[in-house]
Image (cartoon, grey):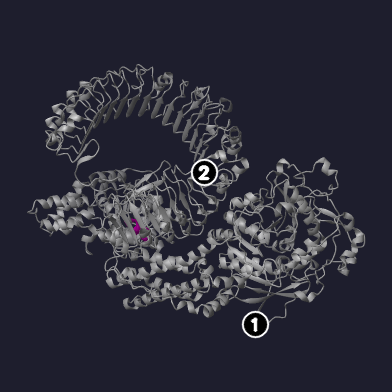
Amino acid sequence: MEILSCSSASCCNIINLRGASVHKSSGSSQPKLPGSRKRILCGRIDCNLGSSGYSNLDHFCTKNHDQHEGSRSLPAFERFSNVHPKALGDSYDGYVLDGKEGVGDTSERRDQITRILIPGLPDDTNDDSGARISSCFWEWKPKLTVHYEKAGSENVNSPPVLFLPGFGVGSFHYEKQLKDLGHDFRVWAVDFLGQGMSLPCEDPAPQSKEESDSERKDFSWGFGDETEPWANDLVYSIDLWRDQVRYFIEQVIGEPVYIVGNSLGGFVALYFAAYNPQLVKGVTLLNATPFWGFLPNPLRSPSLARIFPWAGTFPLPAFVRKLTEFVWQKISDPKSIGEVLKQVYADHSTKVDKVFFRILETTQHPAAAASLASIMFAPQGQLSFNEALSRCRMSNVPVCLMYGKEDPWVKPVWGLQVKQQLPEAPYYQISPAGHCPHDEVPEVVNYLLRGWIGNLESKGSVALPLLDDPENVQYGTTRDLEFVREGSRKSVKSQSEVTWMAFESYIIRNWLFFTIGKTRFCPEPEALEEHGSMAEAVLSALMEVIFEKTSSRILEYGMLRGTEKEMIQLQSILSTIQDVLKEAEDKQVTNKTVKNWLVKLKDAAYDADDLLDEYMMHTLEYEAGADDNKKLKDCMINLVCNFFSRSNPFISHYNMKCRLKQTGERLNAIAKERSQFHLKGSNVNQTYQSSRRMESDSYLLESDGMGREKDKEVIIKLLTDNGHGDVSVIPIVGIGGLGKTTLAKLAYNDEQVDKHFQQRIWVCVSEDFDVKRIMKAILESATGNTCHLQEMEVIQRCVRELVAGKRFLIVLDDVWSDDHEKWERLKNSVRHGSEGSKILVTTRSEKVALIVGTISPYYLRGLSEDDCWSLFKQRAFKFGLPKEASIVAIGRDMVKKCRGVPLAAKALGSLMCFKREAREWLSVKDSEIWNLLGEENEILPVLRLSYDDLPSHLKQCFAYCSIFPKDYSIEKENLVQLWMAEGFLPSSGRKLPEEVGNEYFNELLWRSFFENVTKDSDGNIVEFRMHHLFHDLARSVAGSDCSTAEVDQQASIPAATRHVSMVCKERAFVMPKSLRNAGKIRSFLLLVGWQKIPKVSHNFISSFKSLRALDISSVRVKKLSMSIGQLKHLRYLNLSDALIKKLPSSICGLLYLQTLILKHCDHLEMLPKDLRKLIYLRHLNIYACRSLVKLPKGIGNLSSLQTLPIFIVGRGTASSIAELQGLDLHGELIIKNLENVANERCARTANLKEKGNLRSLKLLWEHVDEANVRENVVRVIEGLQPSSNLKKLHIENYMGANFPCWLMNSSLSNLTELSLIRCQRCVQFPPLEKLTALEVLSIDTVDAARYISDDCTNDGVVDYVSLKHLTLKNMPSLLGWSKIEERYLFSNLKKLTIVGCTEMTDFPNLLSVESLELNDCNIQLLRMAKVTTSLSNLIISRFLELVALPVGLLRNNMHLLSLEIRDCPKLISLSGELDSLCSLQKLTISDCDKLESFLESGSLKSLLSLSIHGCQSLQSLPETGIRDLSSLQNLSLSNCENLTGLPETMQNLTHLQSLAISSCPKLDTLPEWLGSLVSLRELELWYCENLLHLPDSMVRLTSLQFFSIWGCPHLEIGFNEGGDDWHKIQHVPYIKINGPYIQAAGVYQHRGKY
C-alpha cells in the first residue's frame, strides 16, 4: 500500500494556521486547474500515532469525518493538535515527522563494520544547488498529457536514467535524485497517467445538467453516466502505464534507458522490461511492489473476469461512485495522509513537507477521485511479478535490488524472494530506511546507482559498490555508509547480501539428516568403448558448455543456492581438464590409451550436463507451477509447511547437492589419470604429430592431369586474358583431394602460360598465412636461392623490385586463412607488376575465395566415372590385369564410391594393387571406405585436414550431421534447431542462437563440407546434401556417438550411442532390442517411412530419459502417450504429418522445449491449454494444420517465440489478436479469422508495425457476410500496418471498399511480393509505381476494378522496373492496365498470367516477357500478344471461338521452348505455325476437339516432349512430322477416341525414353517395329480395351525398366502365369498390372527425402 494520489494541480490555495493565504506553485507552465474544495495543508504528525505495523493502513479509512467543506475550514484547527510549533512561525523551513534528530543517526556502530564515506547531496547553502530541473508536459494522447521532470540534458554522451514513482506520488518525489544525478547523467522522472500531474484536462464522464445542479455539484470529474469519445476504453491499469513508458522512451528520450522504480514504479519498470527488453539497459527496484491490480485479467482468468464485467473504465457504475465518495473522504484527509507518511519513513527526522504538500495538492484536482476508482478496479496485468522476472532473466536484462529494511509494506522478505530468483542481481538492504529509501537516504541510493550503472557501462571493469570482494557475494557483508547532510555526518547501514544460505544450510544439516539413510548416491560403472568416438568432435565444446553452466547465473536460482562449495570445486576440476584437453586430442591420434581416456571423460561430461539440466529444471518447474495469487505471508510458516510436504525443497535440494558432489568426484578421478599420459597443459610448448599434408610444388606427372582437359582450358583462358588495372586474383574452389593443386600445376606448366608471363612463382601457403613467410617464399621461388632476410621492410622492397614492370603469375596453393587484412597486405606488395599479372589461388573454402578473388570463383567438380576408372586402373592393375575377370566389374563398382574425387581413386587403387583374389575385392567393396583404410592411407589425412582446421564448436556440428543417412536431403532450418537442442549454439551477447546456427552453417558451407544447396524464391538456403566422402568423414569422427540404422530387430546400436537415426522401411515400427540398451540417447530421428504407427508407447518414451531431440515426423503417429512429459530434457519435438487429434496435456511440462513442429497435422483440432507454460519455446510450427480452428490463450506469454506461421483470432478474449503484441516473430505469419477483431484499437495491439523480423504477412478474413463485419474491416485493417521491412504481403477476402492508407501511401518500401485476393469491393489499387522493390504482383477476383493504375496520379511515362511476375485472374470488369496504356512500361517483366479477364482487350507493350499465359480472355488480347518477340513459354487456354492462331504469334517467337494449347474446341489446324519453332522442346495440345492436323513439316528437331490429349478428330499422327522428331524423349497420347494406329515413322525415334498411351479405344494393335525404340525405358498402356496383344519385338526392348498396364483386359490374360505374352516382358525389372507390382527387381523405394 502506498500514498494514494492521482494528480497535482499546478497551483493551489493554502490556508495556514495563522489565517494567511499562502500561494504555492510548482513553477510549471500548465494552465491552472480548477479545484473543487479547499483544504488545510499544514500540520505535524505525532510520532506516537499508532505503530508502524499494518493496523495503521486501515486507521484513516475507518475514522469518521465530516464531509462538508465547512468542517475543514480554519475553525477546525483543534483537529490538528499535534502540529509542530515551528509551523506557526514565519521562519518555518519545513517540518519533520518527529523532531528527535538522533533517531536516524546510526553512527554508533560496531568497530568491525566497515565504514565508507560517500558524497552528500548538493548543498544549497554553499551555492551548490545541483543540476537544474525542468518541468515539462508531453501530450501522448488526446486529452491525456503526461507531466515529467528532467535534468542533465547537457550530458549528451552520458547514459539516460528514467525514474518511475510509487503509487500516490509523482515525479517530484525524485527531485533530490535529479538534482544530484543530473551532474553525471541525463535523468527523467515521469508521472503515471492517473497520478501526480498526469491527469486529463477535461472530464472523461461529465455529469448531466440535473446532476450538476444537485447537491453533488462540488464532487469531482468522471462521475457522469456518459463517457466522452476520447475516454472510451480508458482505464488506469498496469498495461496503460507500460505503454506510456514505452512511448515516452521512444518519443521523448529516444534511446534505451536505465529505469529506476519505487514501489508501484518498480513493478511497472519490471513489467515494461519484460515486454520491451530492447529499450531497457537495466532496472533498479526500490522496494518494488510484488503485485498490482485487484481484479482478474480477462486473458489469464477469463472465468473470474466474467464475474467482474466492469474493470476500471468510464463511466463508473453507481455503486463504485458511492464507494469512491466514501473512501475518498477518508483517504484525502490530511491526518490520514500524515499517518501514512509516518509509516513510509523509518527515519522520522526526514523532512517531508514537500511530499506532504504535493500529495494534498494532488487531491485538489477534480479528476483525482475517479482516477483512484479506475486504478483500484483496473484488471491485473497479463504477467505476474514472477513471470516478468523470468522474462527479464531470459532477455538478460540487468536488475539491481535496493530495499529499505524497515519498510512495513514491502517487507525485506519480498526482496529476498526476488534475489532468490535473480541471484546474479546485486542486492542492497538499507537501514534505517522505509518504503521510500530514495527520499530518506537519497545519498545512499545515488551512490549505489552510480556504481551499478558504471559497472554495466564499463562491462564489469568498474566494480560493483560494496561487492568488490568476491567473498562478499558468498557470505554477505554489512557496511556503514557515512555522508554529510546539513553540516553533520549521518550514517546508515547497507547489507550487500543476505544470510539466508546459512539458515538454509543449518536446516539441512540439523533437520534432514534422517532422510539420507535410505538414499544411495553411487555412480554407475561406465564401460569404455574400444573403438573410435565423437570425443574429439564434441568434448571440447561440451566441456565449455558445462563450465558455463556451473558459473551461469541461472544455477544460483532456487534450490541450487548453498551449493557454492561443490560448484567451485567442479569449476576447478573442469578448468584443469580444459587445460589438457587440446593436448589430449592431439595425442589420441596415435595413442589409443589417451583415446579411451577421452571416451571415459566424455561419458562423464554428458552425465554432468544432464545433472546440471535437472538443477535448472527444478527452478523452472517451481516458477511455472507457482500460483500467482498465493503470496508469502510468513517465511517460517512456509518453511515448516514445506518441510512436511512431499515436495520438500530442502530434501530435494540436499539430494541434488549430493549428486553434484559425486559428479565432481567422478570427474576429479578421471582428471587425475591425466598424469599417466604426461599431459601438462595447453601452455606447454610441445610438438605433436600432425596430419598436415606435404608442401606442394609445381612439378607434375603426366598422368595426374587425366580428365582435367576442359578445366585446364578454362583456367588458361582466365590466366591469359589481359585484365585491366589491378592484379587479377583467380580462385579455384573444391573439396580436399578433388585435384585443385593438380589443375593449378596443369595451367602453371602449360607452354602457352609459360610464354605469356615473364615471371612465374609457386608458393605453398597451407594453414599458416604468414605474410613474411609467403613473401620470402616468393623470393626463393623466383631466384632459386634461400632468403635470409629478416626485416619486413627489406623483404617487401625486394618483392616489389622482383615484380616491378613484369607480367607475373603467382600461384598460392592451399590457402586457408580468411583474414582480409593479411591478404590485402600481401596483395599490396605485388601491385607493381605490369598489366595482365595474375594470382591463382587454390582453396577449400568458398569464404576464402570470395574474400581474395577479383572474379567469381572457379568451382572444381568431380571427375567422370570413366576418368576415375582410368586413374584407379593405373594403380590397381600396374602389374597387369587380374586373372579373374569378375575383379574388373567389382573394381568399377568400387570406383563409384569415389564420387569423382581423384585422390580417392588413386588411394583406393594403391590399396587394391596387391589384392589378387575376387573375395578380397568383394570384402573391400562391401566395406565402408573409412573402415577399410588404415593410418597410412592418403584420403583420411587429406580430408581430416579440413576437419582439423575447424574450431571445436564447428567440429561437433559437422560430426552431428553423420546422424543423417547418405544422400539424405537435410533441411537447414531443422538442422539448426537440432544443433540448438543439443546445446551446440551458445548464446553470444545479443545474438540469437538461430543467428549463431546460421553462421555455423555458412562457415561449414564455405569450407565445402556441405554442397548441393536448394534455395527458395528469396535466395535463402532451404536444403542441402553432403558429399559421400564428407559423410564418411563425419561418421569416422563421430564414431559410436552417432548411429544410423534401418528399423528391424537386427539393427546394431552401441550402448554408448548418443544420437540415433533410423530409416523406417518396414510396414510397422518395431524398436530394435539394441536401441533399448542405448539408454543415454540424446537425439532420436525416425526418418523416411510414411507408415502409420498407432501410438508412440510409454515403453518407447521411458527408454530415453536424456532425450533432447525427438523426430517422428515420418511415421504418421496417431496417438502420443502422456508419458511424453517424462522427457524433461526435451528441446526439439517434430510431429509433422502426424494423424493425432490433440496433444497430451503433459507436453506442457516440457519446460525446456524450444522447438515444436506440427506441420501438416491435418487432424489436429486443438493445442494444450497450458501451452503458455513453455516459456523457452522459440518455434511453434503449425503450418497447414487445417483442422485447427483456435489457439489456446496465453500464446503472448511465450516471449521467446520466433516461429508462429499461423495465428487464429478467436472470438472475445479467446486468442485475442493482442496476444501478438509482445512477440518478436520471424519469417512468415498468417493471421486468420480477422473478422473476430473488434476494432482498430484491438488491431493495433497486435503491434505488427514493430515486428521488423517478419518477412511475409497474410491477412485473411473467413466469414464476412455480416454487415457489421463489413463496416468494421476498413478500421481493422488500418490497425494492422506491418513493418516497413516486410517483403511479402497477402490480403485475402477483404471486404472494404478501399485498401488501407499504409498500403496506399506506399510505406512498405521493401515489399517484393503483393497478393490481393478476393477483395471484391475495392475499386482503386495502391500506387504500384511507388512500390519500387515490387517483383511479384498477383490480383485475383477484385470484381469492381476496371483499371489497375490511376492515370490521375501519374504524369509522364511510368516504368515498373522491378516487376518480374504479374498475375491477373477472374476480373470480369477489368478493361486494361490503365486508360492510357502507352504511358506504362514493363521493361523487366518476365512472366505474365491473365486468366478470366474477358473484357480486357489491351495491355502495355511486353518487350521482355518470357512466359505468357492467356486463359479465358478476349481474343483481341491474343492478337495483341503477337508483337512480343521474347517468349520462351506460351500457354493458350479457353479461347472458345479460336479457329486458328493469329498469324505471326509463333513465328515472331522463334526461340519458344514450351508451347501449350488447351480447351480451344474450334481450333482446326496448326499448319505452318510451328515451322519456325526450331528451339521448341515441349509441345502440349489438349481438348482441341476439331484439331485434325499439326506437325506437317519436320522443323521441330529440338522437341523433347510431345503430349496430345482429348483431340477427338485426330485419327493418326502425321508421318512426315513425326519422322523428323529426332530428339523426342517423351510421347503421351490420351483420350484420342479416333486414333487407330501409330505412324510407321515413329520407329526412327531412337531417343524416345517414355511412351504412354491411354483411353484410345480404337487402337487394337501395336506395330512390330516397336522393338526398334532401343532407348525406351518406360511404357504405359491404360484403358485401351481393344488392344489384343503386344508385338513379339518387345523382347528387343532391353532398356525397358518399367512397364504398366491398366484396364486392358486382353493383355491381362496374356500376362497371367504361363500366359502366351509373359515371355515378351519378363526381362523388365518393374511391372505393374492394374495397380500393384507383379515384378519388382531390387528394393522398392518408399516415399521419403532421398
Q: Which residue is mark 2?
A: 1208
Evaluate whether residue 653 shows in this view: yes
Q: Residue at x 40, y 45 (%)?
A: 725
Where in the figure is residue 939, as x and y percent of width and height? 24, 58
User: Neighbour class for label 2 at 10 Å: few (<14), some, many (≥20)?
Assistant: many
Disc 2 on helix, strand or loop? strand
Q: Which residue is mark 1?
A: 112
Where in the figure is residue 244, as x and y percent of width and height? 66, 51
Where in the figure is residue 1207, as x and y percent of width and height? 51, 45
Disc 1 on helix, strand or loop? loop
Residue extent of the magenta highlight:
955-962
Residue 960 falls inside the magenta stretch: yes
Where in the figure is residue 724, as x and y percent of width and height? 38, 43
Q: Please name whichever residue, 526 or 471, is drawn nearer the observer in this view of the structure.
A: 526
Identified by mark 1, the residue type is Gln
User: Neighbour class for label 1 at 10 Å: few (<14), some, many (≥20)?
Assistant: few
